[in-house]
Amino acid sequence: MSKYIWLIRHGESEGNLEGRIQGWQDFPLTNRGRRQAARLAERLAEENAIQEVITSPLARAATTAEIIGAVLGLPIRYDDRLKEYNFGPIEGLTKAEIKEQFPLVWAAWQLNEFWEPLPGEEGERTFEQRIRAAMTDIINSLAEEAAVAVVMHGGAMNTCVRSWLGINERGWRTFAFDNASVNLVQLQAKVLSGLDDDSEQEAFRMLGFVEQGDQVEYNYRMVLLNDTSHLGGLMGSRPAWFSGPRSSKT
């Protein structure tokens, strides 16, 4: 038995286009970002098992989710816990401005390390705890063999994927997620109430010996990672910290 999560990064925002650190600042989607979301919705319309769309309430994610929901005919659920990391005083700044005004933060970022939180900043531990709590609730509420679309942000997605794959590396730059990219995660039930054998678990399910709410643990399988095949020529901006090459075709 499996559950499926479509983990989706929002379409291109004005902050992405300008190369700014966004955090909790509410940048809207660009025209291209809206078109990306429409392409994304067409892609997800082929996935019949999606039963709900859940999103961060920040405008760039919420608008993306609303475009998806309109095409799929599904209501949108907003969850404050899915918001991006609160970067405090560096929000709204470009790379050059951070390098000049907050050199220690810039140095840590280049090394893919967290830094000592600045006044008004959220902090690594608080951020990761709220993202994991939100995703745990989403997983627990999802029916077997069903799927949910979750629209969120690059930093939050990094936290999810690192946790699911057992990657202990800290920092923001383990994975780079493009705007309107999709990531499909399959959750396969591993342990039911202390049962270790897969066939034994299934037999106990079929016989009704496993009650609803019994403890379930999962193996996480990444089926798709940063898939943008649906975007074609609508590839948008790279994350603000990204400085590597990209194909001239995009």
Image (cartoon, rainbow, N blue to C red):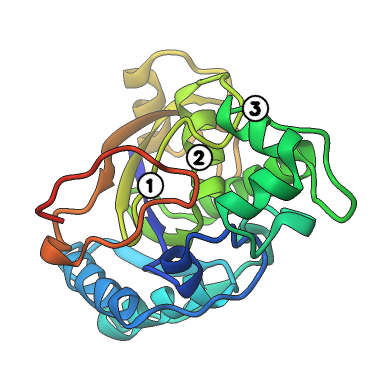
What residue would you read off at disc 3? 113
Above or below, comparing residue 109 to residue 75 in the picture: above
Residue, x 54% and y 54% (percent of image)?
138
Q: How far apart are marks 2 and 3 (CA)?
A: 13 Å
Q: How crowded is mark 1: few (under 14 residues within 10 Å), some or many (20 or more)?
A: many
The answer to whether any part of residue 133 appears in the image is no
Q: Up-down: is 150 above or below 78?
A: above
Q: Which residue is drawn at 28% across and 76% down?
A: 32
- Residue at the right extreme? 119
The residue to which callout 2 is attached is 158
Query: How far across and how far down the image is residue 118, in percent?
Result: 85, 46
Comparing 120 with 19, the one in front is 19
Say if mark 1 contacts mark 2, CB within 8 Å.
yes
Give the number of the mark in front: 2 or 3.
3
Instruction: Pinpoint residue 1: horizontal percent, then vertical percent.
Output: 33, 37
Q: What residue type is labelled 2?
A: Asn
Q: Give amino acid for label 1.
A: Phe
Q: Which of 194 and 30 is in front in this view?
A: 30
Question: Residue 35 lies in what quarter of the image?
Answer: bottom left
Label 1 vs 3, first from the N-terminus: 3
- Residues at badges 2 and 3 in contact (C-beta under 8 Å)? no
Residue under numbered circle 1: 177
Q: Quadrant of residue 206?
A: top left
Q: Earlier in the sequence, mark 1 or mark 2?
A: 2
Residue 191 falls left or right of residue 45: right
Amino acid type assigned to the residue bearing label 3 in the image: Glu
Note whether residue 225 is visible: yes
Position of 189 with respect to 38 (left or right) is: right
Please count the marks in the image: 3
Label 3: which secondary element: loop
